[in-house]
């Protein structure tokens, strides 16, 4: 009977220590998990914006290649313009020249808009990265507190 009581007493002491640990920890583990999720979300947002920036940069390159091709064709059309033999051929070539010039102008405008968008994306990335760094610092602090609390009762 005394042996059972001493075992129950030891269990009660352990239970008291666990209650103190739980009370000291409070919502710290939840806060740590929430911070980790928030950091992950911000990192995913940064990666998404970097991906969009890369895709837009590729689009600019494609547009520039297309503009170069159209410029080359434009040079050829203008050279052929002086060698036409009838009005129908002249009209067809001038139509091609006009179409190429309009397309080049549209591509230049699109590139300008994309460059503006890339600038906006860069600014957004630059705003989010320090926030992630600050969140990482907060996370490290909270994890350190949690480790200290665990260390106090585990030793």
Image: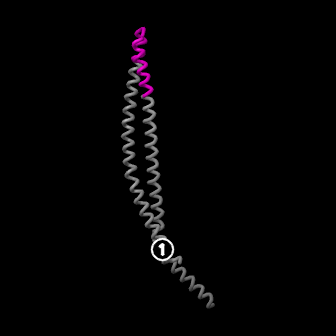
Residue 89 in the image, given as x and y percentages of width and height: 43, 12
| Residue placed furthest toward the top | 85
Mark 1, other Cα within 10 Å: few <14 / some 14–19 / many ≥20: some
Residue at the spot of label 1: 149
Vertical placement of residue 62 versus 20, above or below: above
- Looking at the picture, tell me which residue is in the foreground, 40 or 68: 68
Residue drawn at (41%, 16%) of the image: 79
Residue 68 in the image, given as x and y percentages of width and height: 43, 28
- What span is colored magenta in the figure? 68-94
Locate the N terminus by quadrant. bottom right
Residue drawn at (51%, 77%) of the image: 153
Q: Main secondary structure of the magenta part?
A: helix
Residue drawn at (46%, 69%) of the image: 144
Vertical placement of residue 12 versus 113, above or below: below
Vertical placement of residue 100 versus 81, above or below: below
Residue 30 in the image, given as x and y percentages of width and height: 47, 65
Instruction: Classify residue 131 by image quadrant.
Output: bottom left
């Amino acid at each position: 009977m005394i042996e059972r009581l001493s075992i129950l007493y030891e269990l009660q002491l352990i239970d008291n220590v666990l209650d103190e640990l739980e009370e000291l920890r409070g919502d710290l583990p939840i806060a740590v998990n929430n911070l980790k999720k928030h950091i992950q979300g911000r990192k995913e947002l940064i990666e998404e914006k970097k991906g969009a920036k890369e895709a837009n940069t590729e689009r600019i390159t494609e547009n520039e290649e297309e503009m170069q091709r159209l410029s080359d064709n434009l040079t050829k059309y203008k050279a052929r313009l002086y060698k036409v033999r009838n009005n129908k051929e002249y009209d067809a070539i001038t139509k091609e020249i006009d179409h190429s010039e309009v397309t080049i102008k549209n591509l230049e405008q699109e590139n300008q808009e994309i460059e503006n968008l890339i600038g906006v994306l860069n600014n957004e990335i630059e705003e989010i990265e320090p926030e992630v760094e600050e969140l990482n610092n907060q996370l490290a602090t909270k994890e350190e507190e949690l480790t200290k609390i665990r260390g106090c009762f585990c030793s």
